[in-house]
Image (cartoon, rainbow, N blue to C red):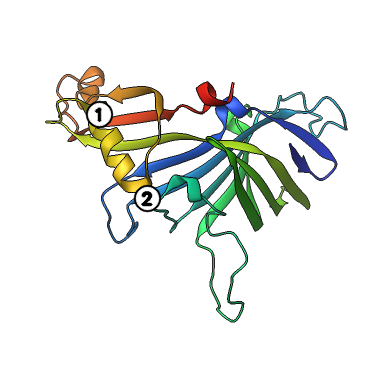
Amino acid sequence: MLHIGPHTYELVRVQSGFVLWIEQPDWRCPSGQNWRLDAHFVPGDHGPSRRSDGVDEYLRLAIFPHDYSVRDWRELKGLGLEPLEDESKDVVWLGLVSVENLLAPRTAQELWHVNPGELKVRRTGDYLFTCEFDGIIKLADHEEELHFLDEIPFAEVCQRVPVNAREPVAYAHARAMREIGPFEIADSRVTTNDWPLKKDPNARPADAHEVVLRTAWQCRTA
């Protein structure tokens, strides 16, 4: 459940999750791991409505750490948003937190910055993690406290796979398990490198396939 000031929102778990992009390490991402926490919400049945202009709400809370990695996905913690063991160290969290109304018209896009507090993450079984987060959301003309507490699954792993890989899904799964430990996949999606040609016959193919592996959290927690 998400609280923004006096307003309450219910989690859409099937659309929410921890997502990992595995890339080649470079100066922007030394570990090669790009984690993201996406949590989707709809207005709750109780409490006042935040909207007064008739626009529906479907909110996405997104947390993007710029430098976070784990050796095993089961050891996910607060994406760097947790208290320091040594408080004498002066460490600044590198990342972005935002809340966006995905149903807002393009002419009136609603995307708000959040000043983050602490993110607590604790694995509660299989692919689910109990997450608690607090922050200050900066609205157009004022600020409101934000608090979120719910179970979020480890949902997807995405990566680019060489075009000469005979079995892109198997290649992606093997590489991901080397990177973050074993996990089961429920299904997958492969975007082959010829996708630019579908838009423009004169375009050049991409230099890699893109593979999305969906973990088995729904199968194991149903």
Q: Check disc 2 and report the residue beneath it.
A: 33
Q: Depth check: give the residue in front, 158 or 186.
A: 186
**Above or below 118: residue 189:** above
Residue at figure coordinates x 61%, y 48% from the top left: 122
Q: Can you give x and y, in whole percent of width and height, for residue 43 in the image?
A: 76, 28
**Above or below 217: residue 160:** below
Q: Which quadrant of the figure has residue 221?
A: top right
Kind of residue at badge 1: Ala
Q: Can you give x and y, in whole percent of width and height, for residue 207 in the image?
A: 17, 35
Q: Check disc 1 and report the residue beneath it.
A: 170
Q: Are marks 1 and 2 in contact (CB under 8 Å)?
A: no
For label 2, the SS is strand
Residue 91 visible to an observer of this rendering: yes
Name the residue furthest left: 164
Q: Which quadrant of the figure has residue 102?
A: top right
**Above or below 48: residue 219:** above
For label 1, the SS is helix
Name the residue furthest right: 47
Kind of residue at badge 2: Gln
Name the residue furthest bottom: 88
Residue at figure coordinates x 50%, y 62% from the top left: 94
Residue at figure coordinates x 22%, y 35% from the top left: 161
- Quadrant that contains the N terminus: top right
- First along the sequence among labels 1 and 2: 2
